[in-house]
Amino acid sequence: MVHHQKTTSRKLFSTVVVMVLLTIPSYASSATLAAIEKGTERAVSLPSKRFGRCAIRSLKNDTIKGQNRIRTFNGHVISKAKIDAFIEHQMDSLKMPGLSIAFVNDDQLVYYRAVGVKNNKTLEKVSDATIFDAASMSKTVFSFFAMKMIDEGLFDLDTPLHRYMEYSDIAYDDRYKSITARMVLSHTSGFPNWRFLNQQGNYDPKGKLTIQFEPGTKFQYSGEGYEYLAKVIAYLKGVQKNELQGLISKTVFEPLAMKKSSFVWNDYIEKHRADGHFRGKPTSGYSSNAKDPDFKASASLQTEAKEFAGFIVALMNDKIISEKNRKELLKTQSVKRATERSKEQQYGLGIVIEASEFGTNYAHGGDNLSNTAFYMFNKERKVGYVFFTNSEHKNAFNKNLVHFLSTN
């Protein structure tokens, strides 16, 4: 029995390792990270303060009343008390300031916790009202929204985007005229991650948008592509890019009761957002903030675990978008080839896909240096989880979480 549990844990963990590799920060060099820690580059470094263990508080919500056990990916059932104890231990051992975490079974939220502190200097506590940075998990939500726009006939997945809107930033290179929404959402557009990062990973404000290979021929993770598609959708809708927030609210957030979630900074987020931390110190990292408030399809979603869990339920249970476009979203569209450091990775439209012994897992991570997040769900088993932390400890926490879920 013990040998079987260890084998199961290794198999599920190997799946998750592949998924999180895509979200390891690629936006900064080691020199830039050191500068951020010192407070000399794009982030304000504040003194840290040790914080005490924070009591875990239960969410009083009808959707989780009476649910004392949570079903996991391997079919095991774990008590809430065990998960509470696991979380408390992880918060202490990893020195995680704050955490928002939720589990879903079938079409229900079965577990939710918001714990820790928003800032380990002020010691203001995380609460059910606290908002976290989703970072690159924004891509899944934006992809879902894009598929809804396709359902409504706004544009086609395989029509070159330049036929809808010319893009002056890259008009000098005719290869851009072949880029489609499918290429953008599956990271095969040929664009770099960000134009303002040079080949060494250092910030260059004068960076020019380029196409680095023939569009559609291979995988390269790109936030630039998502921003291009967002501009096209805004153009077709006759609105400014920031006004896409209103469209996403109407078509996705409101039906899913995601009342606090937003791609654009607002007064509520200003008041309730958890401060990021890097190496134990409060710092803004690369997260959205009042000085950088605008809509970024690839990175600016502000939300928390309970609301994002509702989005996972929609993905698992065929809500809002058509069956045809859901299949497109969740099928393999591109492949990130294996390297010496990573395994081959399959990508759908804004989502990572990996086979496991329990069926297909779908996932994505988010990493803005001082705020990190991750979700994973299994559509066949109807189970999933999501968490946000205002620290860089996503990978360590997720590794320990998967081991815990696999062996209990």
Image (spheres, rainbow, N blue to C red):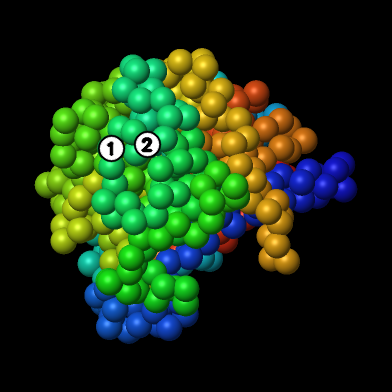
Q: Classify the position of the N terminus by image quarter.
A: top right
Res. 406 image quadrant: top right
Q: Secondary structure at mark 2?
A: helix
Q: Position of residue 341 (x, y in %)?
A: 69, 65
User: Please, is residue 380 above or below residue 181 in the view?
Assistant: above
Above or below, comparing residue 124 to residue 43 in the picture:
above
| Residue type for callout 1 | Met
In the picture, measured across the screen, residue 339 lies left or right of residue 218, that is: right
Q: What's the distance in space between the residues labelled 2 and 1, CA to CA?
A: 6 Å
Where residue 395 sits: x, y (%)? Answer: 55, 59
Local packing at callout 2 (Cα closer than 10 Å; few below 14, some 14-19, many 20+) is many
What residue is pinned by disc 1?
165
User: Is residue 118 visible in this depiction of the protein?
Assistant: no
Q: Is 104 rendered above or below residue 351?
A: above
Figure check: 284 above or below 219: below
Q: Position of residue 291 (x, y in %)?
A: 16, 61
Q: Are circles 2 and 1 on residues that touch, CB within 8 Å?
A: yes
What's the residue at 49%, 26% (across, down)? 315
Q: Position of residue 35 (x, y in %)?
A: 35, 82
Q: Quadrant of the C terminus?
A: top right
Question: Which residue is located at x 58 percent, y 50 percent?
Answer: 219
Q: Is residue 217 visible?
A: yes
User: Which residue is drawn at the image coordinates 29% and 55% (left, top)?
Assistant: 169
Towards the viewer: 357 or 136? 136
Residue type at mark 2?
Leu
Image-based side of 341 in relation to 235, left or right = right
Left or right side of 403 for 317:
left
- Farthest residue in the left direction? 267
The mark found on residue 161 in the picture is: 2
User: In the figure, residue 297 lies in which quadrant?
Assistant: top left
